[in-house]
Amino acid sequence: MTIHGVIPILRMGDILLTTVHIELHDAVAEGFQADVLTAIEQRRARGLIVDISGLDVVDSYVARILAETGRMALLMGTQTVLVGMRPEVAATLVRMGYRMEGVYAALDLDEGLALLRRLGRR
């Protein structure tokens, strides 16, 4: 069972913005991933920003969902940028040996938008 619509996805031109403000338990994380991919397809987004500043803890499952969502988005032609990563979350990801291949990171929304603009010019 997946839960859809729990995490809002906003459109800003050709960029989608979503803020993860709740803990991503299994069903919520799977629903979030499905919602993001559907929104990319329907809105033909070229960029996706995922604000994870609301996440206090990231376990291996959540890290995998975030990385997979970024890779899936890239296959659909959409660059993904994670913003708002807390130091303890970054440390956890490194200690777990998790690589966020295909996913960029920026400190905040402004830097994430600037990064997507630079990537779009390539």
Image: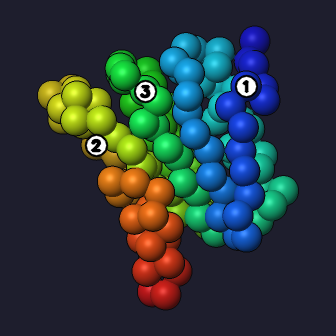
Whether 117 is drawn above or below 58: the answer is: below
At 70% across and 64% down in the image, what residue appears?
12
Which amino acid type is shown beneath numbered disc 3?
Leu
Quadrant in which the N terminus appears: top right
Q: CA distance from mark 3 to mark 2?
A: 18 Å
- From what the image shows, is residue 93 above or below residue 83? above
Residue drawn at (74%, 58%), measured in percent from left and top? 11
Residue indicated by mark 3: 55
Residue 99: image tag:
2
- The amino acid marked with disc number 1 is Val
* Residue type pointed to by label 2: Arg
Tell me the residue that label 1 is attached to.
Answer: 6
In the depicted structure, whether residue 103 falls above or below residue 117: above
The reply to whether discs 1 and 3 touch (Cβ–Cβ < 8 Å) is no
| Lower sequence index among marks 3 and 2 | 3
User: Which quarter of the figure is the C terminus placed in?
Assistant: bottom left
Q: Secondary structure at mark 3?
A: loop
For discs 2 and 1, the disc positioned in front in the rendered view: 1
Side of 26 where 52 appears, left or right: left
Farthest residue, direction right: 42
Side (left or right) of 61 relative to 39: left
Q: Quadrant of residue 91?
A: top left
